[in-house]
Image (cartoon, grey):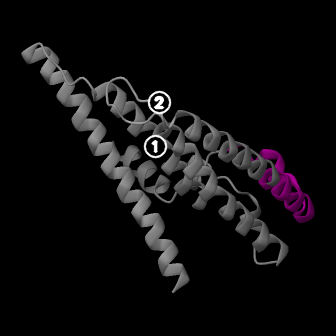
Amino acid sequence: MTSRIIESYYWTIKIIMAALLAAMVVLVFGNVVLRYLFNSGIAVSEEVSRWLFVWMVFLGAIVGLREHAHLGVDTLVKMLPPLGRKVCFVVSHGLMLYAAALLSEGAWKQTLLNWDTIAPASGLPVGLFYASGLVFGVAAIPMLLHDLYLLVTGQLANADLIAVSESEDHPNAAIKASESERR
């Protein structure tokens, strides 16, 4: 039951990201068409599309963190014995926890500070812009703690100790490589 709720949560984030991307496309494309064809435009288009982009990036970072889909350099870690990999895993997750906590604290403060400040074009509270960092930080901390819990309880395989993925490791990379060879 719990895993179904978690899967629904991440599926919802992906749907929200798709909606944000669609809204950005409509706003930007609509603004370009209006400017070139009708010599007018949508006043809020640039501001709102920028905000939507920032929200989409932070939501995408949540999904990427969960799927361990962030790119990274793991050359040194792959050469280490299992104990060395575990130490690197703990250190990297500890640093990410620290960064997520700092981001959460800073985003919270900025959200509160700027909640009464109104954006010039849209009239929305500027605090909404900074809330995206808060959402990421609050979502990232439990995921990172869960990964550390899995390590401490011995539930992580040796391959899972490398918490980044190379572009070749992506599930669709082999398909894309074979398609490009055919061309």
Residue 39, located in which quarter of the rendered image? Answer: top left
The amino acid on which the numbered mark 1 sits, given as a three-letter code, is Trp
For marks 2 and 1, the one nearer the N-term is 1
Q: Is residue 162 magenta?
A: no
Report the residue marked by disc 2: 117
| Picture coordinates of residue 163, whole percent (x, y) | 70, 57
Nearest the viewer among 117 and 1 is: 117
Nearest the viewer among 51 and 113 is: 113
Instruction: Decide if residue 165 is in sight here.
Output: no
The amino acid on which the numbered mark 2 sits, given as a three-letter code, is Thr
Residue 62, located in which quarter of the rendered image? Answer: bottom right
Q: Which mark is residue 55?
A: 1
| Residue shown at the point (34%, 46%) measured from the top left | 20
What residue occupies the far front of the structure in this picture? 116
Q: Which residues are magenta?
A: 72-93
Q: Main secondary structure of the magenta part?
A: helix
- Looking at the image, residue 77 sits to the left or right of residue 46; the answer is right
| Picture coordinates of residue 36, whole percent (x, y) | 13, 15
Quadrant placement of the C terminus: top left
Residue 48, located in which quarter of the rendered image? Answer: top left
SS class, disc 1: helix
